[in-house]
Image (cartoon, rainbow, N blue to C red):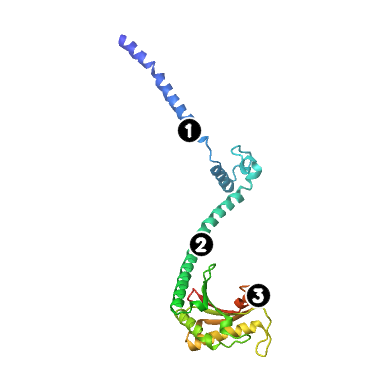
């Protein structure tokens, strides 16, 4: 009988195990609730937008999460979530698409810059070794890096109102031709420029005609005397349209009377 009573007393304490299990479960439950109380509003908005678009849920009622106009304003905003969510996705896609293109353009520009700088350095070095650097100006297109430019004074090359190359300027132009021979497989553009003093004689009716004739004469000299391929040579006249100095002074007008030879970076 004593053993039976002892066994019965042990059985009566079984509720404690059940109670402790219940407390553990409640603790886990409240911890779970606490962990869910920190809601990411952005992800919640995306979730609502996705569900609203796909299953038409949340078509009525209101959510109190966040202060944003999409959620806290109630059901009237939910009908626009589809457009909002779509536009948000498009913006992200557009940004992702633009980045590779922008990176490609940046790389392409850096390659052009490097190529143009190499041509510029080589032209300067060749001009110095050919003892012609004092008679010409060498610059580089520092915006688009499209060309290296050799500028010659029109007063040195031509007499006033004439397109015939002076005898003393032929040596200078010949040495410039030696530089251009290294780049005769590139596009070489020759531009004639004048000041804004009107001209009208038996040979030329305007500065535009005069500048065009001067550029053409330089092209013919390079082609005939220096045997530079005519395939990539071109000549044009700009007249008084692109001054580099003021036409109000004699020195400014002298600077504007010039011939520019542009060696383009691209081979084709």
The image's mark for residue 32 is 1
The image's mark for residue 246 is none
Q: Secondary structure at mark 1?
A: helix
Would you place residue 233 above or below residue 80 in this image?
below
When asked about the image quadrant of residue 242, the answer is bottom right
Q: Nearer the viewer, mark 3 or mark 1?
A: 3
Q: Is residue 156 visible?
A: yes
When asked about the image quadrant of residue 2, the answer is top left
The local crowd at label 3, few if under 14, some if 14 to 19, many if 20 or more residues have their Cα within 10 Å, is: few
If you read the primary sequence from the N terminus, does the residue marked by circle 3 or circle 1 appear first? Answer: 1
Q: Residue furthest front?
A: 250
The local crowd at label 1, few if under 14, some if 14 to 19, many if 20 or more residues have their Cα within 10 Å, is: few
User: Where is residue 37 drawn, in percent x and y?
Assistant: 53, 34
Rendered residue at 61%/39% (across/down) = 67
Q: CA distance from mark 2 to mark 1?
A: 46 Å
Q: Which residue position is annotated with label 2?
A: 101
Viewer-side residue, 24 vs 216: 216
> In screen coordinates, is 87 left or right of 223?
right
If you read the primary sequence from the N terminus, does the residue marked by circle 2 or circle 1 appear first? Answer: 1
User: Where is residue 192 drawn, in percent x and y?
Assistant: 59, 80
Viewer-side residue, 35 vs 6: 35
Q: Which residue position is annotated with label 3?
A: 249
Rendered residue at 49%/77% (across/down) = 133
Q: Secondary structure at mark 2?
A: helix
If you read the primary sequence from the N terminus, does the residue marked by circle 3 or circle 2 appear first? Answer: 2
> In screen coordinates, is 263 left or right of 6?
right
Q: Nearer the viewer, mark 2 or mark 1?
A: 2
């Amino acid at each position: 009988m004593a053993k039976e009573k002892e066994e019965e007393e042990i059985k009566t304490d079984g509720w404690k195990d059940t109670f402790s299990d219940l407390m553990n479960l409640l603790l886990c439950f409240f911890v779970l609730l606490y962990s869910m109380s920190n809601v990411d509003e952005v992800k919640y908005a995306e979730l609502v937008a996705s569900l609203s678009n796909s299953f038409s849920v949340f078509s009525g009622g209101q959510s109190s999460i966040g202060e944003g106009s999409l959620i806290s304003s109630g059901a009237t905003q939910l009908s626009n979530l589809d457009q909002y969510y779509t536009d948000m996705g498009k913006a992200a896609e557009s940004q992702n698409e633009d980045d590779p293109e922008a990176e490609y353009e940046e790389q392409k520009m850096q390659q052009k810059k490097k190529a143009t700088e190499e041509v510029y350095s080589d032209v300067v070095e060749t001009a110095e070794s050919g003892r012609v650097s004092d008679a010409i100006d060498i610059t580089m297109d520092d915006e688009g890096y499209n060309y290296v430019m050799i500028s010659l004074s029109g007063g040195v090359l031509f007499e006033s109102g004439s397109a015939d190359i002076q005898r003393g300027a032929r040596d200078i132009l010949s040495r410039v031709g030696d530089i251009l021979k290294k780049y005769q497989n590139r596009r070489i553009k020759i531009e004639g420029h004048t000041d804004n003093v009107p001209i009208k004689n038996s040979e030329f009716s305007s500065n535009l005609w005069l500048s065009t004739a001067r550029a053409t004469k330089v092209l013919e000299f390079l082609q005939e005397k220096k045997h530079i391929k005519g395939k990539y040579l071109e000549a044009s006249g700009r007249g008084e349209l692109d001054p580099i100095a003021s036409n109000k002074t004699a020195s400014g007008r002298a600077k504007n009377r010039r011939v520019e030879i542009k060696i383009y970076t691209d081979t084709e």
